[in-house]
Amino acid sequence: MSVTVQQIQDWCARLIEKSPDFPPLAECVTKIPQLDALADLPAGTRVLVRGDTDVVFDDDGSIEDDSRLRALIETLKFGVAKGWVQILYGHRGRKPELSLAPVAAYLKKLLADAGVNCGEIQVVGDWMSDETGEILDVAKAAVAKLPNGSIILLENTRKYKLEQALWKANPADLPGLAPKLGAYANGMRDKLAKVHVNEGFAASNRDLSSTVVPLTMDRVALGKYIDGEVRTHLQKTQQAELVIFSGMKLEKIDDLQAILNRGQVKMVIAAGLLALALKKADADLAGQSFEMGVAGQPDSKIYIPPERIEQSRAMLTNGRKHGVEFVLPIDFILGDGQPGDTIPAGGAQFDVGPKTIALHAAKVDEFIRYHQQKVAAGKGPAVVFHNGVFGKFEEELFAIATRKFIDQLRKMTAAGLLVYVGGGEGGAALHKYGDESWVTHCFTAGGTILKALGTEPIPYIKALYLAAKH
């Protein structure tokens, strides 16, 4: 049904508000329909499919990692078999100029390999007004003339600034945004489709295409791939007791804090910029000093400000109070490739050193023993979540710790632990130095997993849950 500006405003307020009392993921997914629930829709039904199209193509049109596009195939195949007209939309990176044209060509090839003939997959270049949120008639006309079983793509959603309007919005912003958002959501319904399927597993920001469009739809559902991820692997990962956490983004401190807030974690193995913040905080708590090198210099691109150190002190103090062990680096690989127990002023760490690698091995053995005791007590296997890499692993000189820890993941899996790897660099390292069979499951989306492991619902799950109850 079409919605009013006030309804849009109220809906968006629920999307952006903190939700400590919102149902957990397991309960949410029991309320959100699966794709099979739409099997009664007749041929010719127009269906919006929010896809995970964020992939990187080389200049020659080849793609190194096509897992996200392959994850779309079962849902698209289902729709083609039903004779639906599927309107696929999504983004590529954050650059508005990146086109989905190569995505269309690649999907056609993947579908053909799967025995599906959907004809040419067109791309609608301009389909929305960024100023008003109105869906353009050219998009309506393009969709209206398609035969049953067709697929069409709407060009990169990130070409429109409006798509990200809710990313940093607060309640005070909503009265000014609501008319545009209402025009967008109502226009999608009135001009394109009244059914919305979400198959964009990695699209976990508050994109309008994932979170606002479902409000106006008659029917919503989770796609085949995303449904399997959230109903099985994601829920299991939420039980992680060992978390291996690294990276160069300071926002990961927030992610780690959210994970610790769940009360499940017993051990954290930290590296990267995150570990430097924790090392500095740990030294402060012990009345000692710790030199962070360039990370302690305000003009540095990797500067760790005082508020992040304070946040890390609080995390260490509270975590230890609740029995969490933090395993921090005890030596570092510096820019010349040599190990050192300290980081010189003006220097930088590019990996963790051999002493830390040995410490990691010992702690993994310790956790395996904990797992064995748990299984002996009839409490099931321990769960591990691995995210990120330990150093600048794209350069072999600084990839040793990352490579060796992939072996530790295999060791834990062989011992019967459930080992889950987030997407992004952690997944890339697994594929480079090992194999997916070495772990229980490797996700295609690091950011989504981090959100899911926190206490705040994934935005698109929140939206689909509200839409299913609407």
Image (cartoon, rainbow, N blue to C red):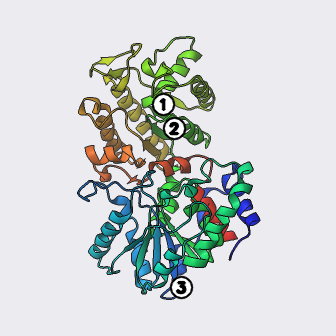
Give the image location of residue 389, x and y in percent.
Answer: 37, 37
At label 3, counting other C-alpha atoms closer than 10 Å, the crowd grade (few under 14, some 14-19, many 20 or more) is: some
Q: For the C terminus, give its image quadrant.
A: bottom right
Q: Residue at x 34, y 54 (%)?
A: 56
Give the image location of residue 215, x and y in percent.
Answer: 65, 68
Comparing 224 with 334, the one in front is 334
Comparing 382 with 70, the one in front is 70
First reached walking from the N terminus: tag 3 or tag 1:
3
Q: What residue type is disc 1 on? A: Leu
The residue sitting at the top extreme is 288
Q: Which residue is mark 3?
A: 41
Q: Which residue is mark 1?
A: 274
Q: For the N terminus, give its image quadrant.
A: bottom right
Residue 100, can we see it?
yes
From the viewer's perspective, is residue 160 above or below residue 335? below
At label 1, counting other C-alpha atoms closer than 10 Å, the crowd grade (few under 14, some 14-19, many 20 or more) is: many
Spatial separation of the CA atoms under disc 3 and disc 1: 49 Å
From the viewer's perspective, is residue 46 above or below residue 436? below
Comparing 186 with 357, the one in front is 186
Spatial separation of the CA atoms under disc 2 and disc 3: 42 Å
From the viewer's perspective, tell me whether residue 212 is left or right of residue 414. Answer: right
Element type at mark 2: helix
